Amino acid sequence: MRIAITGASGFVGRQLVPLLRNKGVEILLIGRDPEALRRAFPQCNVVSYTDLSAAADFDSLLHLAVINNDQAADPTEIQRVNVDMPVDLCRQARALGIRRFIFVSSIHALDHSNRSDYATSKRLAVERLSDISGIEKWGLYLPAVVGGELAGRLALVSRLPGFLQELALLSLRSLKPTVSIARITETILDLPETENPAITLVIVADDQSANNVYRTAKRFIDIVFSLSIIVLLWWAMLIIWAAIRLQSPGPGIFLQDRIGRNEQVFTCLKFRTMYVSAPNVGTHEVPAAAVTPLGHFLRRTKLDELPQVINILRNDMSLVGPRPCLPNQANMIIERRARRVFEIKPGITGLAQVRGIDMSDPAGLATCDHEYLQLQSLLLDFKIILQTARGAGSGDKISTAASSPDESANPSVKSDRQ
């Protein structure tokens, strides 16, 4: 494999180049100061941007050059380096017969509420790269990078005694997502061929399932939350149960099979919000008339989810995670299976919920669930919990289709779905 690289003198490039060379990759470095690059990488071929033709017919052009938020630059310069440069390089790569253009960004650019010059420019670059045809394009989104050396706030860890560094890193990684240089290297070398005419975006992060600090802390939070709800709100749950029973025939607690971690079926508990005649389908397919008057209030306030604290104690669910789907939602299962969403426990609330994405959009929901899988961390969980508490998202939307006269008039119910 032959890879041309821009921006190799940066933090990621300094550690990535040696690993790629150790994998047998032929490297060509491209930069504004070729002499400085030769001193830093004496075993690599180096050219300037004006000699880009030396990369003709290379397998990939990996673009690392960037102006970050911590660098002093005016908006015009940021636009030139972060937007115009990658777009121009991608077009030149296509003309030179380079098969693949790899654009590297930070996960900060995924957050559209982040209006920093860096994040805004990176999003604009992706939009413009998507319009270029005739070359395979990939966008790699990286969280904090961990390698042989540590940068940014992670550099503080290197001052600790050796025996404490690993524990400190695990603790920090549980708070925010990270990625190792080795993982970035593997991702670059293993990118499959894609026929996507736009740009294929991938989050590259280390798996939190291997982080015992994260797993222990998340489970501890789940248990403390569930027990607190039971101890503090048992009386409110009892009142809600009684009110449901009094308003319409049927049980106060609704039991329903859902798909959990590793596609295992479990029984999900909720307060019943629909007449028992409601069909066993996703909420977005259920007519609005199937929801009881009290059910509308419970769903709007999300109080119908309170019994799921029992599911958390059973370890079927977590406080934060993808919302569990029904066994008969085949499209949803296929989309989630393709994105490895079933590798983690479902949750009472999640990233998709606070963004207002529900199960009426299986592909969009599964994509958002996969983003959470890649970026899960304690700080992200706390953020989602706070947004949920503030009323972010509207929950699963019910259908706006009218029900039949018999169905809407008959409160002899069947079951609350989702």
Image (cartoon, grey):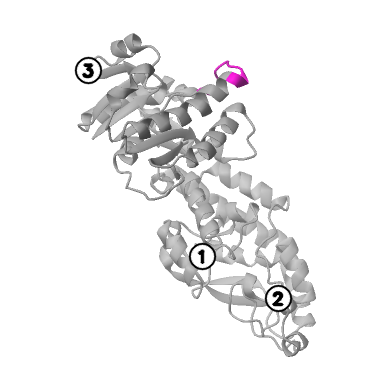
Q: Residue at x 51, y 65 (%)?
A: 314
Badge 3 density bin: few <14, some 14–19, many ≥20, Cα 10 Å? few
The N terminus, quarter of image: top left
Nearer to us: label 3 or label 1:
3
Judging by the rendered image, the residue that carries numbered circle 3 is 43
In the rendering, at what x and y percent does residue 25 appear? 23, 31
User: What is the chief secondary structure element of the magenta stretch?
Assistant: loop
Q: Is residue 151 left or right of residue 364?
A: left
Q: Is residue 234 left or right of residue 111?
A: right
| Tag 1: amino acid | Arg
Judging by the rendered image, the residue that carries numbered circle 1 is 314
Of residue 298 and residue 92, the one placed in the foreground of this image is 92
Q: Is residue 364 above or below residue 161?
A: below
Name which of mark 2 and mark 1 comes first in the sequence. 1
Which residues lie in the magenta part?
67-76
Q: Is residue 292 above or below residue 18?
A: below
* Residue 23, image quadrant: top left
Which mark, by number, is residue 401? 2
> What secondary structure is found at the residue carrying circle 2?
loop
* Residue 405, image quadrant: bottom right
In the rendering, at what x and y percent does residue 381 appear? 57, 47
Q: Is residue 176 above or below residue 279?
A: above
Q: Residue at x 58, y 16 (%)?
A: 73
Of residue 119 and residue 22, the one placed in the foreground of this image is 119
| Tag 2: amino acid | Ala
Q: Is residue 402 left or right of residue 32?
A: right
